[in-house]
Image: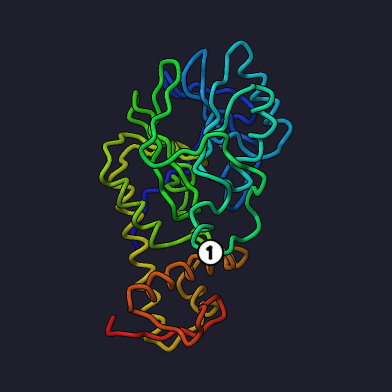
Amino acid sequence: MAKIPFIHNYDFEYAKLEEITPMIRRVTAENPGAFSFKGTGTYIIGRGKVAVIDPGPLIDAHIEALKNSLKGEQVTHILITHTHMDHSPAAKELKEFWQCKTYGYGPHGAGKIASGVPIEAGGDMDFVPDVVSQHGDIIQGEGWTVECVYTPGHTSNHLCFALKEEKALFTGDHIMGWSTTIVGPPDGDMTQYRDSLDILLERDDEIYWPTHGTCIKDVKTYVQAYIDHRQEREQQIIDCLRDGVGIIEDMVPIMYVGVGEHLYPAAGRSVLAAMERLIATGAVKSTDKNPDIASLYTIATTA
């Protein structure tokens, strides 16, 4: 597989406000896990009048840490990368406490609902942004400027936020330093995800700040490694099909050697996302009208 230069060092202390650049600070929530690494990193940009990015989960200690850490400052904006439960739920209480507005692409599933795609449970269904933010929108505060970069794939409402003054991109879960990103249908979409990776290659950002883990500095190399990894996963699917393995449940142990079985369900969703992309390109077919994890797949061309 393509070697992604993961970064597993993460120096932090839960509930502590850390200064990481002249314009960026961070407080990490104590919600470590298989999909959140050490926890949710809530970012604060600016000084005095500030923006908060991804206020995080409903953990009292984290919410209180943010309130206490920003005493004496004015929070003017809350920016939401997407609506998974480790990113947006704390926004409801904090926007009331700080008397400010939330900004995001839309509610959970916003990028799919219009086309009639059902949205799975598990997202923050209560979040609706006060200000809907689209690709290319500029959000300005006192001494800072943020550009919205629409990056669907992990979720259909995923936004990255570019801090223009530092050429820094807050990547949410689109790009993570410690792991690859889960892309699970129906809200997750591998074709959209791959297109969103290409968008990042065209940009001039110099550093990434994911919501989980530390920063990524060699950004072009890192994004290309992500793309190469996804291409190799597609080739693994083709190889499985050529070997007569046509059900995703049977592919996962072959494709994810060394990965704990507790992660197989999430891996299966990512394989399904890749399978949908291969069907769309005409490389793979299924006898099911609406293919899913349990469907049987075969090669449709000489892929």
Foreground: 206 or 143? 143
Which quadrant holds the N terminus? bottom left
Structural crowding at the residue carrying mark 1, measured as other residues with C-alpha within 10 Å and reported as few (<14), some (14–19) or many (≥20): few
Residue 254 in percent (x, y) is at 47, 75
Indicate the amino acid at tag 1.
Answer: Gly
Q: Residue at x 43, y 89 (%)?
A: 244
Q: Secondary structure at mark 1?
A: loop
Residue 44 in percent (x, y) is at 52, 25
Q: How is the image coloured?
A: rainbow
Residue 256 in percent (x, y) is at 48, 68
Residue 209 in percent (x, y) is at 43, 36
Q: Residue at x 36, y 52 (%)?
A: 196
**Image quadrant in which you'd find residue 136:** top left
Q: Residue at x 34, y 23 (%)?
A: 165
**Image quadrant in which you'd find residue 292:** bottom right
Which quadrant holds the C terminus? bottom left
> Is 117 above or below relative to 246?
above
